[in-house]
């Protein structure tokens, strides 16, 4: 008789965004005439940039020709894309990342869930609270967490680093030393940021403590302030302690196209008494090679096109469009008396729920009275209770209509 990984059974309910999708479905079935505006999941709505669409078409034509047809992609990514990423995302910012430290994949969600496979189950993880749920849930599945306390909404054996109004939504260094630290800045869900100086403190801490930082920089394209780093490798000695996750979903609208990459520097080495000197880089390459057959050629060509001057100009406009939505949400809610943060270096607006409403009470209230969907802060962790996230990724029209409706409540 087979035996299952019972760690999966420890997980309460379903994944946050699946849960929300189910609630919307149920509400729509019961109220078919209510027109719902979705500002919940951070999914883009603007079409792909024309320069990217052209690259996709050209790549499809190549695939239609026997002379240029491509089969399996190199499992770690095509050199043309890895070289382009190294040049534009790193060298241009003064960070020395070799193309072969870049591992191309089909999504940062998968990478952020898969990366924990490199570490043994007895590592202690630290996460911001609130946090993107994938980091915690994937560690639960792997058996790296203890038991779930439904009352506090926390797992034993996990270090939670509260990000609250009191600390400006920037975590303090933990009291107990973690082995693996997850950081996401600009932050999902609070929209908060760390300055380079603040991030350097984390890098110094991790290097001193022998911890690894898994740095999710999926939202870097939304940074508008000069002292906010776009990559953790802008900090000194970060290559000795940090893995970086990057995505094409939010900067280039690839949520339905799927492309991302992870940087695992060669400096991330260690000594093991049974196996001697080893590197996380080589372990991740081995994992990628074994479990993954490479992102499609067509999609990697589209990814390369993202860095062309033409696409960069088009995408700057697209990011500007979403950030104007962020401004509309932020100003509109502030005028309506809400306490609001985020939306300056990130496409997320984080608001305090009115009165004593819990996050889920406010979700229901907003759905039933304004027919607007957002994401309950408590879905991201206990410190998110009493907060609510709205995304700036909607269309302009829907964003304006949603705010008008909320203002009338
Ligand atoms: C979110 O809404 O938090 C994001 O869209 C989730 C994701 O990027 O997977």
Image (tube, rainbow, N blue to C red):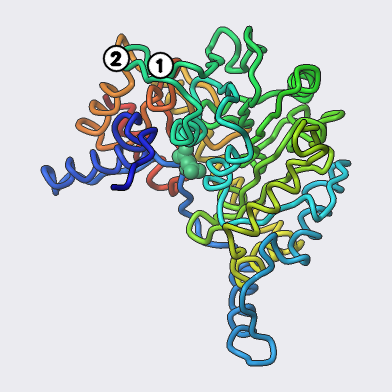
Identify the residue at image location x=70%, y=65%. 305
Looking at the picture, tell me which residue is in the foreground, 52 or 339: 52
Q: Position of residue 324 (x, y in %)?
A: 55, 40
Q: Is residue 214 above or below residue 103?
A: above
Is 130 displayed left or right of 51 in the figure? Answer: left
- Farthest residue toward the bottom? 66
2 and 1 marks in contact (CB < 8 Å): no
Identify the residue at image location x=81%, y=53%. 86
Q: Position of residue 289 (x, y in %)?
A: 65, 59
Residue 63, located in which quarter of the rendered image?
bottom right
Identify the residue at image location x=88%, y=44%. 96
Q: Position of residue 306 (x, y in %)?
A: 68, 60
Ligand 1: does it lie within 8 Å of the C-beta at label 1?
no
Q: Nearer the viewer, mark 2 or mark 1?
A: 2
- Badge 1 element: loop
Answer with mark 2 or mark 1, whichever residue precedes in sequence.
Answer: 1
Residue 175, located in which quarter of the rendered image?
top right
- Farthest residue toward the left? 30
Is 199 displayed left or right of 368 in the figure? Answer: right
Q: Which residue is mark 1?
A: 337
Q: Is residue 163 visible?
A: no
- Badge 2 element: loop
Q: Is residue 210 visible?
A: yes
Is 96 displayed left or right of 37 in the figure? Answer: right
User: Mark 2 Cα within 10 Å, few/some/many (few <14, many 20+)?
Assistant: some
Q: Is residue 62 above or below residue 31?
A: below
Q: Which residue is mark 2?
A: 357
Q: Quadrant of the C terminus?
A: top left
Q: CA distance from mark 2 to mark 1?
A: 15 Å
């Amino acid at each position: 008789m087979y035996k299952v990984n019972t760690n999966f059974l420890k997980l309460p309910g379903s994944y946050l965004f699946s849960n929300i999708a189910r609630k919307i479905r149920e509400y729509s079935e019961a109220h078919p005439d209510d027109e719902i505006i979705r500002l919940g999941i951070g999914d883009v709505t603007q079409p792909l940039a024309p320069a990217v669409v052209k690259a996709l078409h050209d790549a499809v034509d190549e695939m239609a020709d026997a002379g240029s047809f491509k089969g399996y992609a190199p499992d770690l990514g095509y050199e043309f894309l890895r070289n382009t990423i190294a040049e534009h995302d790193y060298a241009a910012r003064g960070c020395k990342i070799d193309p072969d430290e870049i591992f191309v994949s089909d999504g940062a969600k998968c990478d952020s869930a898969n990366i924990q496979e490199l570490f043994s189950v007895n590592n202690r993880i630290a996460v911001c609270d609130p946090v993107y749920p994938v980091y915690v849930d994937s560690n639960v599945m792997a058996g790296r967490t203890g038991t779930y306390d439904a009352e506090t909404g926390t797992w034993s054996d996990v270090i939670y680093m509260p990000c609250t109004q009191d600390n400006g939504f920037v975590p303090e260094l933990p009291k107990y030393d973690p082995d693996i630290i997850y950081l996401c800045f600009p932050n999902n869900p609070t929209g908060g940021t760390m300055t380079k100086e603040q991030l350097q403190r984390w890098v110094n801490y991790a290097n001193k403590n022998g911890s690894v930082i898994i740095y999710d920089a999926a939202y870097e394209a939304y940074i508008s302030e000069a002292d906010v780093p776009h990559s953790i490798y802008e900090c000194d000695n970060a290559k000795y302690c940090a893995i970086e996750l990057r995505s094409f979903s939010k900067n280039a609208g690839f949520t339905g196209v799927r492309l991302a990459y992870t940087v695992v520097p060669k400096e991330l080495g260690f000594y093991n008494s049974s196996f001697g000197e080893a590197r996380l880089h080589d372990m991740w390459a081995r994992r990628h090679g074994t479990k993954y057959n490479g992102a499609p050629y067509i999609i990697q060509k589209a990814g390369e096109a993202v860095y062309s001057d033409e696409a960069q100009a088009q995408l700057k406009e697209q990011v500007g469009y979403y950030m104007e939505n962020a401004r509309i949400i932020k100003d509109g809610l502030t005028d309506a008396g809400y306490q609001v943060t985020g939306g300056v270096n990130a496409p997320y607006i984080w608001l305090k729920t009115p009165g004593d409403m819990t996050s889920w009470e406010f979700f229901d209230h907003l759905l039933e009275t304004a027919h607007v969907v957002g994401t309950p802060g408590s879905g991201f962790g206990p410190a998110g209770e009493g907060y609510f996230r709205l995304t700036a990724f909607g269309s302009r029209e829907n964003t304006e209509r949603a705010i008008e409706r909320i203002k009338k409540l």
